[in-house]
Amino acid sequence: MWDWLIDEATPDTILSLPEVEIGEKSSEFIHIIHAATKMAFAYKMIKVTPVLARHWEISRRHMAANLHKIKHWKILCADYSESLDIEATWFIDPPYKESPGKGYHYSSSQIGYGALAGWAEARKGEIIYYRSDRGQEQLSLFAR
């Protein structure tokens, strides 16, 4: 989806995306993510509710109006440790640990949080990093 937004989408193509009808079913990931957030990968189809229909209407307008803000982004589809150490704005939001981390496409048990924290704190530029020190009990934002 990000590749499409960055490389191909225009405000007009976003605004021309089909509206959803309350009561219909959708298998479009962009609709599912609006309804299910982190559990989105668990669903193949959802039923469009009034709330989802309203959120989709608002989201299309918001995406179209703000598309220009992401056209310069570069997406690396790889392990975070493969990222170049360049001056950038780094937004790092790893999955929660333990029980709250369940439901993601890949388990949070595979993440070395200590190594990730060290890597994040060594980045050049602006860092926005959410870190959980004790599972879900404490979540803190470190920005520099």
Image (cartoon, rainbow, N blue to C red):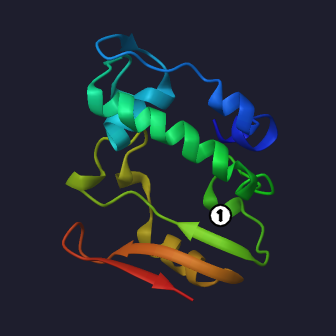
Determine whether, in the image, residue 101 is placed left or right of residue 18.
Answer: left
* Image height of 73 relative to 86, above or below: above
* Secondary structure beneath label 1: helix
Mark 1 neighbour density, 10 Å: few (under 14) some (14–19) many (20 or more): few
| Amino acid carrying mark 1 in the image | Ser
Dividing the picture into quarters, in which one does residue 100 lie? bottom left
Q: Give the mark count.
A: 1
Q: Is residue 5 visible?
A: yes
* Image height of 72 relative to 26, above or below: below
Quadrant of the drawing holding the N terminus: top right
Determine whether, in the image, residue 91 is placed left or right of residue 82.
Answer: left
The residue that appears at 57% across and 89% down in the rendered structure is 144
Direction top: furthest residue: 24
Residue 28 image position (x, y, % from top left): 49, 20
Q: Observer-nearest residue: 88 or 60?
A: 60
Residue 46 image position (x, y, % from top left): 32, 19
Dividing the picture into quarters, in which one does residue 60 lie? top right
* Image height of 2 relative to 73, above or below: above
The residue that appears at 72% across and 63% down in the rendered structure is 83
Residue 88 image position (x, y, % from top left): 74, 74
The residue that label 1 is drawn on is 81
The residue that appears at 81% across and 40% down in the rendered structure is 7
Q: Is residue 40 visible?
A: no
Direction bottom: furthest residue: 144
